[in-house]
Amino acid sequence: MSDFQVNPAPKNDAPGAMLGRVIVSMILFVGGLVLIGTGAIADPAIAPYVFTGGILAIGLAFGLPMIGASER
């Protein structure tokens, strides 16, 4: 038989900090969707900026939970 062992994942954050990051990520994601929708019907002078802000907010929403993550 082999001596295969799985190393436990390191605990970096408190559960409250992780929950806070998840809630902020959800708010950023929904806000980004709202900005994209608003950019589609907004004044043509500001529409590209609002739409781009929505894309950036959604990207940040996906990246925020990854802070401090490490590959196992």
Image: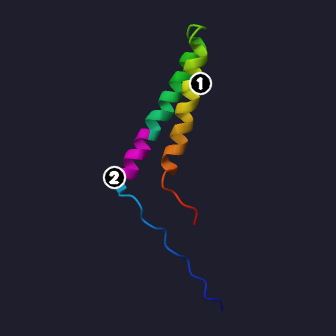
User: Which residue occupies 57% across, 66% down?
Assistant: 72
Q: Which residues are magenta?
A: 17-24
Question: For mark 1, does the 10 Å Cα neighbourhood hold few (<14), some (14 to 19), or many (20 or more) residues?
Answer: some
Q: Which residue is mark 2?
A: 16
Residue 66 got which mark? none
| The furthest residue to the right | 1
Judging from the image, what secondary structure is the residue with disc 1 in?
helix
> In the figure, 58 relative to 14: above or below?
above
Membership of 23 in magenta stretch: yes
At which x and y percent is residue 50? 55, 19
Callout 1, which amino acid?
Thr
At which x and y percent is residue 13? 39, 58
**Circle nearer the N terminus (1, 2):** 2
> In the figure, 21 relative to 41: above or below?
below
Confirm or deny contact between disc 1 and disc 2 (CB under 8 A).
no
User: Which residue occupies 43% across, 45% down?
Assistant: 22
User: Which residue occupies 49% across, 44% down?
Assistant: 64
Membership of 37 in magenta stretch: no
Q: Nearer the viewer, mark 1 or mark 2?
A: 1
Q: CA distance from mark 1 to mark 2?
A: 31 Å
